[in-house]
Amino acid sequence: MSTPWRTDKWFTSPWNFLPEVRSGLRFPGKIKIHDVTLRDGEQQAGIIFTLDEKIRIAEALAEAGVHRIEAGMPAVSPQDEAAIKALVGRNFPNTDIFAFARCMKDDVKRAVDCGVKGVVIEIPSSTHMIEKAYGWKLERAIELSIEATRYAHDQGLYVVFFPIDLSRADFNWGLDLLARVAKEGWMDALAVVDTMGGLAPHAVPWLVSKVKERIPDKPLECHFHDDFGMGAANTLLALAAGAEVAHCTVSALGERAGNAPYEDLTVALMTLYGVDIGINTERLVPIARMVESITGQPNRWNRGITGKLLTQIESGIISGWYRNCKTEPTMLFPIDPSLVGAEPLGVVLGKNSGADSIHVWLEKIGATASDEQVTALVSAVKQRAYEKHGLLDEADFRQLVAAVKTSNRTA
């Protein structure tokens, strides 16, 4: 019988779904993914996407069901502007194309000229950032915000106001800025922004609630960086507190440590909270692999959801579990790898292998061995792993099997 925490595709904790545990959750009826891979993702040091690569990534995201794609910042370069126009010209049926802009009318005009559906307009919201990083008077930040957001609205764009460094701002001053822009300028939605990734998960619901109290009639979006590895967790808590849109990137690409990874967020919503946001999860790993090949910057091999070796078992003990439960992958893994388009569960050979590992591989190559030979193969595999300083491949194993059998015949 299927339950919210256990289906044929996942097996998570039943405690996630206890009424007393879920009583404080306030997920909105509709949650959207706003993908920023092509803008914030490209701000990661050393990453450049060509026009063709941006098109490939955007098409893959749109096919997977991503609701919005932030295609770039037109003011950055003619190439960025051309890419945004090219993506707008694709006319994705269920995916809106947005641009990013500074709080300047000229930036907004460039976005308008690209034909995008909406624009994310940034302004520093912490007094230290305004005065020290930008060298502005505080009132200048407010005036620019009002002017640029009003102009964007007058040009027919959906306006997301994006207050940089909100999580470190003087709270009252930051809220005053938001309130004035909402009243004198324009915002269709407001982003809660943790630019430096310094927001702790337990603070997120409080921050979202306080912003909603002050700006009650605007939908909230969340943009959290991953400097402490909490981008996805913070985003989940913001959505659970009522935010409607999550800013994410493929595999946590982005400035410094990157942004909230949309793979983690999408799967966690589905399996830990019972919230399906309409993303085709089987496309998650293939898209991550494609972006990895484009950037040339590999993901951590055991990274959650998308790691290349995530579903491979080296431990001899776990290999025993695998032999007994391989037709039920969620006994050994919280999700069936097929849910996200990942490689199926398998056993690899290395220093931690045991007898069950050997039995799996003997079956794989269509060979048999006595108990004595299996014991010898365990020792031989461990020794070869030490010599290689890594995992064995099939050729290694076949060679060891042949050597052990030859040794037995000559003994």
Image (tube, rainbow, N blue to C red):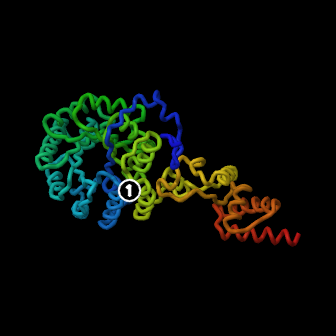
Identity of the residue drawn at 27% across and 31% down: 212
Around disc 1, counting alpha carbons within 10 Å, would you say few (fewer than 14), some (14 to 19), or many (20 or more)?
few
Residue 17 placed where, x, y %? Answer: 48, 34
What residue does disc 1 label?
45
Identity of the residue drawn at 16% across and 56% down: 110
In the picture, measured across the screen, residue 321 lies left or right of residue 51, that is right
In the picture, measured across the screen, residue 304 lies left or right of residue 36, that is right
Q: Amino acid at mark 1?
A: Ala
Residue 121 placed where, x, y %? Answer: 22, 46
Q: Residue furthest right?
A: 411
Q: Quadrant of residue 45?
A: bottom left
Q: Quadrant of the C terminus?
A: bottom right
In the picture, measured across the screen, residue 191 lies left or right of residue 14, that is left
Q: Residue furthest front?
A: 1
Q: Quadrant of residue 93?
A: bottom left
Identity of the residue drawn at 63% across and 58% down: 347
